[in-house]
Amino acid sequence: MYGYQGKILRINLTTSTYQVEALNEELAKKFVGGRGLGTKLYSDEVAPDVDALSPDNKLFIVTGPLTGTPTPTGGRYMVVTKSPLTGTIASSNSGGYWGPELKFAGYDLVIVEGKAEAPVYVMIEDDKIEFRSAAHLWGKIVSDTTKTLEAETPEKSRILTIGPAGEKLSNIAAVMNDYCRAAGRSGVGAVMGSKNLKAIVVKGSKKVELADPEGLKAVVKECMQKIKDNGVTGQGLPTYGTAVLVNIINENGVFPTNNFQTSQFDKAEDISGETLAEKYLVKKDPCYRCPIACGRYCKVDDIEGGGPEYETIWAFGGDCGVSDLGAVIKANFWCNEYGLDTISAGATIAAAMELYQKGYIKDEDLGGLSLEFGNADAVVEWTKRMGVREGLGDKMADGSYRLADSYGVPELSMSVKKQELPAYDPRAIQGQGLQYATSNRGGCHVRGYLISPEILGLPEKLDRFSLEGKATWVKIFQDLTAFIDASGLCLFTSFAMGAGDYANMINAVIGTSWTAEDVLVAGERIWNIERLYNLSAGIDPSQDTLPKRLLEDDIPEGPSKGNVAKLADLLPGYYAERGWSAEGIPTEERKSLLGL
């Protein structure tokens, strides 16, 4: 098989056994890989009513056909499982170097079943698979775990692990690799922790065979030039990282502040990408074969490490009313060490701050800490307490929805399907609001990044307040993103590349003759199988909504003043655009057209 290694590694932790299975080539090409193939195989094997943290749940760690190839950014993998945070299908994306190494070891995906009797880690070295005790690793933070495993495994092994948050089954726990890369969202780290699996180490020596090596060289050259020539991928992201967005988003009045109570932060410049580069940046930190190199490696006081990203800076910064970028870097550092999703962690602290502001959380609940908006020390200390489930941090470790609901005010959680919204106020960007509401994994910006056309003007500039054509744009972006996630590439390539470019790359790697239209159909197939899984798991269309505040309360000030998210006007057109029923259910005709 070209592009694929043709093998699945199935690990049973209950019995400490494994088996190697052949990958179904027809199925792989139909669902591409990564997010698509993982969701298909998962939904075939696991009952939709499974308890996410039970031994009956499974964890699928899946590469794409472009992972480990010379394609630009070909280093991604996906963690697919049922989310303990949302109950939806979870598919969390990570970069770095672990995904390509799994391909080099000869496997397209790993399926983890059952639960180990005691903490273990798995060592994969080509055809050699070992189950080893992780008793000496349990309780360790991510960097200590990684250093220990690097010392006791073959040189240049790649480490995937969880931190204490995953061990303690935090619903916002991440799976970490290469120290600071995260499959961050939806609580996938808790699923790994529930299985007593501390880490998976991989070391490979194989190559990924290509259908048309010379043709791929030409395609890669063309795509690399597009990436270089694009203002976002060739200039903004390489220079300032994703935090280049801070000033741009804030100037448009789209930067949620104080738990979305307003949408512009008067101290945004203090936490901007420009300030990060000037005061704290040590070096760029690119993923495997990435020409964009948006990753940052920063230092403040005695703390240094990867990040923070734009979303993280917003979550611990503007959303908490904090303008101390040093504190944001520290909070990001502790998220990496404990294995927490930075978006959900910061947004949960912001929700807790509003709960305190409104009198629901009392001073006696705080254990000596502050929960006031703008307190820089608070975001660092509450991150640590969430990481080890200490005091109020125990409740916060399961996300903002459960925290707010425990006080009887779930509407103070700025989440969709119980997953915290990221760094864009949907009242001021109507297409992004529709994307948030319909995302298959809850509050998420990377399932269809409408910020690209609505704010950045790529591939063309849309009126962010207008409803016209937004359902069509959302569907296209969601479908294209699903394909990119399945292929093994980074979403950021889509700032510069279109569906035709992805078709050309996939054709040269796996030997198909796909068109741009085929790419979008494959993405649509993936989107629909996720929707079908969620429906069978009890996630009904009534959950295609936004927090009450964003639907009813006008933005109080700034360039977007007076706007609300007009979801009710957009949703019927979106369902129609997808060929679903008026109630948001994929029709038999649509399923048949997509081969589902």
Image (cartoon, rainbow, N blue to C red):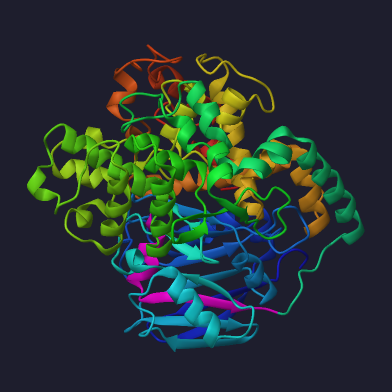
Where the N terminus falls, by quadrant? bottom right
**What span is colored magenta in the figure?**
187-204
Residue 594 shows up from this direction: no
The picture places residue 219, in percent across and down from the top left corner, at: 85, 48
The image quarter containing residue 337 is: bottom left
Q: Nearer the viewer, residue 296 or 104?
A: 296
Q: Is residue 199 left or right of residue 350?
A: right
Q: Residue at x 30, y 68 (%)?
A: 54
Residue 363 shows up from this direction: yes
Q: Residue at x 32, y 84 (%)?
A: 117
On whether residue 86 falls in the magenta region, the answer is no
The picture places residue 559, in percent across and down from the top left corner, at: 46, 14
Q: Tag count in the figure?
A: 0
Q: Residue at x 62, y 53 (%)?
A: 486
Q: Nearer the viewer, residue 17 or 49?
A: 17
Work out which residue is located at the far left of the displayed protein and give it. Answer: 364
Above or below, 235 against 152 in this view is above
Work out which residue is located at the far right of the displayed protein and give it. Answer: 214
Q: Residue at x 62, y 45 (%)?
A: 491
The image quarter containing residue 324 is: top left
On whether residue 189 falls in the magenta region, the answer is yes
The picture places residue 349, in percent across and down from the top left corner, at: 28, 44
The picture places residue 403, in percent across and down from the top left corner, at: 21, 46
Q: Is residue 238 left or right of residue 59?
A: right
